Amino acid sequence: MANIDITRMSSKGQVVIPLSMRDNLKEGDKLIVIRNNAQLILKKAEDFDENIEDDLEFARRTEEAWKRHQRGEFIKMEADDFIEEMKKW
């Protein structure tokens, strides 16, 4: 399951990565920012070539799910059923 947290952009365009999201990051790491429509993907530069297509597909599915949610087209289900549904993805 994806981890989710909230941050804000400063007036200078700076964004703090929440501490809970920095497990595998250290000061000085280079990060690549990928924009896919309304989604931003942040990836370590050294991992850029790994699974980029999967990252973009995840962004596409997330954006589509958000649009369905905004239109009220979401389905309510139990957690176990949701996990089984996710396995089909």
Image: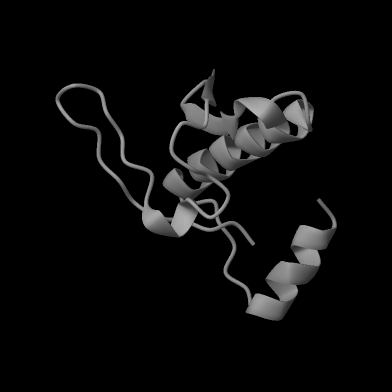
Against 28, residue 16 (above or below) is: below
Instruction: Please tell me in which quadrant of the rendered image residue 62 appears.
Output: top right
- Residue 61: x, y in percent? 65, 39
Instruction: Determine the residue positioned at 54% across, 31% down.
Output: 41
**Is residue 58 rendered to the left or right of residue 10?**
right
Quadrant of res 80: bottom right
Query: What colour scheme governs how the chains and residues are painted in the rendered image of this protein?
Result: one colour
Name above or below for residue 80 compared with residue 32: below
Residue 9 horizontal side relative to residue 4, left or right: left
- Nearest the viewer among 30 and 86 is 30
Residue 35 vs residue 65, the one in the foreground: 35
Which of the pair 17/34 is nearer the observer?
Answer: 17
Q: Give me the residue at 51% from left, 21% from top.
A: 37
Quadrant position of the N terminus in the picture: bottom right
| Position of 41 relative to 71 (above/below) | above
Q: Position of residue 73 (x, y in %)?
A: 54, 51
- In this rendering, position of residue 8 left or right of residue 26: left
Position of residue 45 relative to residue 55, above or below, is above
Q: Position of residue 23 (x, y in %)?
A: 53, 55
Residue 74, image quadrant: bottom right
